[in-house]
Image (cartoon, rainbow, N blue to C red):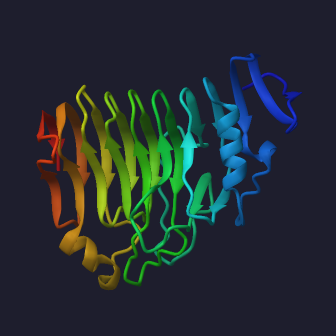
Amino acid sequence: MYPTAATSGAHQHNIYGTSANFSIFNVLDFGAVGDGKTDDFKAFQNALNAAATGGIVFVPPGQFAFLQNSTLTVPRGATLQGTYSTVPSHGVHDGSKPDVGSVLLPSGGRGSEDGCFIELSEDTTVAGLTIFYPDQLPQQVPQPYPWSLCLHGNNAAVTDIECLNCWNAVRAVAAARHYIARIQGQPINTGIYVDETYDIGRVEDVHWNPWYASDVTFMSWQLLHGRAFVFARTDWEYVLNTFAFGYAIGYHFIASKEGSCNGNFLGIG
């Protein structure tokens, strides 16, 4: 798919492509291991920094652990890209980990929903990944974690992502023209939250369902308090073909200090 790798830079990482201004960086070349045990945060962040202003950070198949409570920041113009070109699905009701494709395993921040695992700024994309919390067990009371994906700035995008057992999945605040598409999984507390969006955002083909856990101990919080989609101030949001099952509230329209929502909602379930 790509031209032969050339070696460049102090990290001896691979740069793929025909132009120095458009490159693909493999996280393995920055020291990521993907064995489900080694902390790969530093390797991922170094690869993302190398891709700033226009590059793709490629995440090959593997289980990439993130042990500390730190935020992966995707710089402007960069893309964090896994192996999937469509949203993946994993049946892991027995408590096992997803074992195919690009899997990110955050465990830091347990007990608090403050902060974010991956933060997207202006003109950034995260795509083709599974996010799975290995310490969130399917037959125990679920615990809070920081948001999985936080969007801010113009034209941030999240596509083809499986948020399998996250506490809060996607937060788009001050994220004009955001694009959230082809997302599946089982967020426990909040699926998608939108606020302070003053130019048209889009949410398409998002499906929340209890694929990860249906045990009553695990599901009690979700059934009593969980909200699949929450819309505060957003100006003419486009929401198409979305679905939620097993939540206290499917679509929650609220007023924040910035105001409330108006938009176009089609195919909601």
Give the camera-side residue of 218 and 12.
12
Residue at left 28%, top 33%? 202
User: Residue 235 lies in what quarter of the image?
Assistant: top left
Q: How many marks?
A: 0
Give the camera-side residue of 1 and 261.
261
Instruction: Give the x, y percent position of residue 251.
Output: 16, 52
Give the camera-side residue of 149 and 257.
257
- Specify the quadrant that holds the N terminus: top right
Instruction: Give the x, y percent position of residue 151.
Output: 40, 41
Q: Examine the rendered structure and indicate whether residue 74 appears above or below residue 217.
A: above
Instruction: Give the x, y percent position of residue 60.
Output: 69, 46
Residue 61 shown left or right of residue 157 in the figure? right
Q: Examine the rendered structure and indicate whether residue 83 appears above or below residue 142.
A: above
Residue 53 shown left or right of residue 196 in the figure? right
Residue 41 shown left or right of residue 220 in the figure? right
Residue at left 29%, top 38%? 203
User: Residue 13 lies in what quarter of the image?
Assistant: top right
Q: Residue furthest top?
A: 19
Instruction: Give the x, y percent position of residue 199.
Output: 25, 25
Q: Examine the rendered structure and indicate whether residue 133 appears above or below residue 147.
A: below
Residue at left 53%, top 29%? 76
Residue 64 shown left or right of residue 240 in the figure? right
User: Residue 138 lies in what quarter of the image?
Assistant: bottom left
